[in-house]
Image (cartoon, coloured by chain):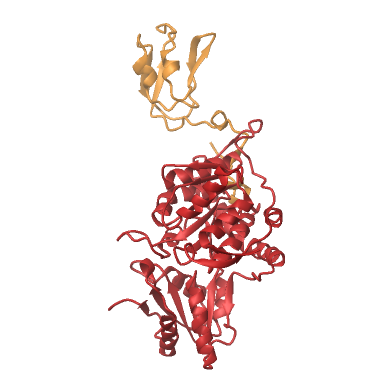
Amino acid sequence: MKKVMTGHKAVAEAMRQVEPDVVAVYPITPQSEIAEYYAQYVADGIVRTELVPVESEHSAMSACVGAAAAGARVITATASQGLALMVEILYIAASMRLPIVMALANRALSGPINIHCGHSDAYLARDSGAVQIFAESAQEAYDYMLMAQRIAEHGDVRLPVIVNLDGFTLTHSSQVVETLPDEEAKKFVGDYEPLYPLLDVDNPSVWGPFAMPDYYFELKRAQQAGMEAVPEVFLSVQDEYSRLSGRPYKGFFEAYKLDDAERAIVVMGSTAGTAKVAVDELRSKGEKVGLLKVWLWRPFPRAEVADALSGAKAVAIMDRALSFGNMGALYLDITSAFAGREGPAFVNYIYGLGGRDVPVEHIVQVFEDLRDAKAGELRYLGLRE
Amino acid sequence: MAVELKSWRELPIGGVIPGGATPELNKTGSWRSKRPIWNSEKCIHCLQCWLHCPDDSIIIRDQKVTGIDYDHCKGCGVCAAVCPVEAIEMVPERGGAA
């Protein structure tokens, strides 16, 4: 059914359909409405979820870990500082291989304090061991929230999955979103079968044991295997979901008019929508430009991204967060994927920090600047010099 | 003591230990630097040491102390400190878990 709804509502709708056993959440702009919608569903008896109104995000993630280890299906949501507070426990959730799904309403980290969009929160959790997916629209946020459940809970993966959606741009603006009928969504997500649930008192187990130098390394390597299993699972879940929804999700990224593109940009999140308008404008003038929009950021599909970009002459990689003292994280992801092989001239653009608007003209200018790209350059888009 | 260490492929997911009760299976007293020596002649079996021991390492039978579990005792010395009759003496450890 097609309805007009905000990104918040789209995420909350997916959560309502999944109807997890436990939602532990703490309010923070621009995520709060997700929790508010869900709290309303609980209060109205629409879902039977145990909503845990915790006193901080550190507690939220701790409650998620406890509930997930107990055997519950768990969802949470946060943004920016909230994620920063969760990160300590998020690493532990990943190491315990707990399939916690999280909606992250991307917001720039303090300081200075700011409530608007940026990807520095997602970047903070980059090495946490959580799978990270970026949505371009409220529709994608809804769709990936459902797919995330399946990816997270797959027996070979069993990792937290973060679905990123740009704060305000996606969370607060209304878009047309097509949702699945409840029964279809529930059937797609399926029943959750916990592993070694702590509530199974007849079969006790020890969770989160201490690991000394003799085992820590092996346990981290085993955790990496969970990440390594993601790509195959991601594709098969996408395939099943595409057939169910009629919306084509195919691959780790969307290649938009990229096949014959000489100049391309790579971006994650809602700016991809703006970039498509710029690509269309330039294409109508006969310019060979294209876009690669990353859906799956962690694990990073290195080989596939490199293959998709290898035909371009110049590529702008856009990071919505600074990695102080180095190039942006996405730039490093992609350029390192070209180690040992010929590739385009890569330029890194830092853009949109703290909600700085990215109009179509800026993206058009990026394509224009790519005509004489100086490889390895770090540029700032929309910054007053 | 040679221990067969497992490869990462053999470990249960997330480091979970199915079955529980792992402290009983593992000898965790190997890093003790002081060893409590219990004197059965001085002991009045008040069980203060048993109550205070954080590692459940005072062995009792029929409500009487019978010895110390050196496989799990960390040598913290709480037992010696709470003993009202100085029946436990802490001596430097000379190595070995038991």
**In the image as oriented, which residue stretches furthest toward the left?**
A385
Above/below status of A124 relative to A48: below
Residue A322 visible in the picture: no
Which quarter of the rendered picture does the C terminus of chain A lie within? Answer: bottom left
Q: Position of residue A95 (x, y in %)?
A: 52, 49
Above/below status of A26 relative to A329: above
Quick one: A292 or B97, which is closer to the camera?
A292
Which quarter of the rendered picture does the N terminus of chain A lie within? Answer: bottom right
Q: How many marks?
A: 0
Q: Position of residue A301 (x, y in %)?
A: 56, 69
Above/below status of A172 relative to B38: below
Chain for colour orange: B
**Residue A234 found in image quarter:** bottom right
The hue of chain A in the figure is: red
Name the residue located 61 percent from the left edge and 54 percent from the top edge. A149
**In the image as oriented, which residue stretches furthest toward the bottom?**
A286
Residue A228 visible in the picture: yes
Above/below status of B18 relative to A143: above
Q: Position of residue B95 (x, y in %)?
A: 43, 30
